[in-house]
Image (cartoon, rainbow, N blue to C red):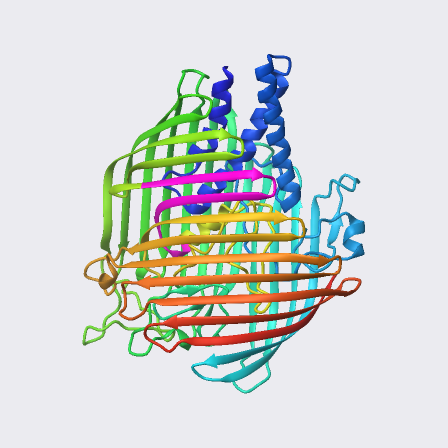
Amino acid sequence: MPRLYRHTTALAAVLAGSAWMTSPAALAQSAANARLSYAAVATADVAATSDNSAATSAQSSGAQSANADAAGQGAATGVAAVTEPGVNMPVVSASDVHAPAMGDEADQAGVPADATGGQDGPLVHDSSGGPDNRHLHISPYIEAQQVADSELSPHSGTLTYTVLAAGVDGSVDERNAQGSLSLRYERQIGESDGAGSANLVSGVGRGSVALIPDALRLDAAGYANRTYVLGTGAALPNINTNSDALTQVYSVIGGPTLSTSAGNVKLDGHYHVGYTYVGEPGDGTVTPGQLPANIAEHSTMQDAGGRAALKPGDVLPVGLAVEGGYYQENVSVLAQRIRDAHVRGEVTIPVNNNVELVGGLGYENVQVSSRNAVLDADGNPVLSASGALKTDYSGPRYIAFDTSGLIWDAGVLWRPSPRTSLEAHVGRRYGDIGGYGLFTWHPTTRQALNVAVYNNMSGFGGDLDSSLINLSDQFQAVRNGLTGSVSPCVNSLAGGCLAGALGSLRSTIFRSRGVIASYNRELGRIQLGIGAGYDRREYLAAPGTVLAIENGEVDQNYWVTGFVTYEIDRRSSLSGTLDAYWFRTGLALNSDLNAVGATAVYQRKIVRNLTASAALGIDSINTQALHDVWSASGELGVRYTF
């Protein structure tokens, strides 16, 4: 088979394999896997043609360099240097403010300074016996903190807490098992008047176990965190103010994934089931003069898909593929439901070594429906004790959105080098014209730029579940040094962020379009990253129901998150994070808001396995309906890592 086809189709198989009109997380996943898969294919070609002409030798040298870069990225970031096509994408954003491992123990163990995001060297299991082949990193810890929160405006006052916490950060990277986990439980004990006590769980994890090596695996992912939520449904992850407006979010997803071949035919498939739960929001979520927003409670989702593909040159000069998928999400509030089924054929036309044209034609059937709320004698909706709408299960289902018919798409894949790739698509889906795309640029093994444009339809839970399952198996979780909460984005050269999915906790099903961009850089002792995005949600609600007033209304969320970590010396480090949100809503007058939060953390190793920390933070929320809120926080703590 000509070299042209083998190089271009290795990339196309990964990119085209992601769901068309797909989620931002899946797009970023495609970028990471395409980069690594392309390098592996290029290396195979090098070995097969090492004695060719000078031109071929030059190409081989470039391919070997690309493969070395991929391995280097894995070593530098803790991300696996080789992944299976279509598996997943790294997650995490801001470096863990419980900073990189420091001190002689970590150095002697041969563990990278930032291997765990913990404060001391982790327990390391070396399955091969060699110092450079460690596959299991476990870093359990206990922690005690003294925290003070002071409201600066519009009122003044200080609340103090004692926080007792236990957690674990770890990862595994074996041939048949990969995964990363950061899990933390904390008991917050209020000390001053007005300071309440609470039990909090936070964490993020993603794992994969091979059931049949190189063919069938079981994937799972989970997320737990507390987030600030307002009466409009706007959510502000990593903002630390007004504990009355905090709510807990939990999400899990898992299922089997198939990736194998039958002769020249590449076969891929998956079936994932997810569940999301949102705790009861506090009283602080209610805006004076307005009814409570219909905040999500819990939801389930199912996502199944299959694909069979022939690469260009295997049978015909062009590549051929057929794929289909089914998605269903059930939302507890008013029994909302989305069903989305499609089947599609695809043709891939190689133009040259760097460019491919892709076109698809198929059929879809998409329907969104719900029930109405229970109404009282005056026609007003009846609310539960928690303030949620009560569903009238005795009534009929109402249709909010219904479309079926032909779908099509056309796109281009451009891959000028193993370090740069671009894909752009436009087509008809969900009854109108839309597009999606992806750009990745990895000029060195220590910096990367990733940009994804997306277009999809789901509810809050389904959007979060889909983002979670597309995280990488190898990542470092990032936590806020003051609150212990998980940062909304990821510290990874492959990019990735959950901030878009977490932008609003409103339960209504929506059509989502937006863009996510991330840039990460490593500069010796300095690690930094920035993520930014725009998410536009158009809500779909059925006429004749109490949610009808939301139909066609739009929420827009602009966000920026960043981090920087500086290793001062072998025993101390300084970290900083920044989160900013601009939320615009068409659902309520005078409800737009701006929010910003920043933290700085200094850490110092005291003795073996014991690290002290000091942190400062400032947060602000500016809304049209209420007074601006400014608050400052401080923390002193110690952590013992086993």
Indicate the position of residue 210 as horizontal and vertical percent values.
Answer: 60, 38
Left or right: residue 541 compared with residue 581: left
Asked whether residue 229 is in view, the answer is: yes
Indicate the position of residue 291 as horizontal and vertical percent values.
Answer: 30, 74
Residue 192 lies in magenta, yes or no?
no
The vertical placement of 312 against 631, above or below, is: above
Asked whether residue 227 is in view, the answer is: no
Q: 510 or 331: which is nearer to us? A: 510
Indicate the position of residue 40 as horizontal and vertical percent values.
Answer: 59, 28
Indicate the position of residue 359 as horizontal and vertical percent values.
Answer: 33, 28
State which quarter of the image contains the C terminus: bottom right
Which residue corresponds to the image point at 58% horizontal and 53% vertical from the top-left?
Answer: 528
Residue 307, by quadrant, is top left
- Magenta stretch, residue numbers: 435-461
Residue 456 lies in magenta, yes or no?
yes
Q: 72 or 434: which is nearer to us? A: 72
Q: Tell which residue pokes out farthest to the bottom in this image.
A: 193
Which residue corresponds to the image point at 22% horizontal and 74% vertical from the top-left?
Answer: 376
Dominant SS type (magenta): strand
Q: 596 or 504: which is nearer to us? A: 596
Which residue corresponds to the image point at 31% horizontal and 57% vertical from the top-left?
Answer: 336
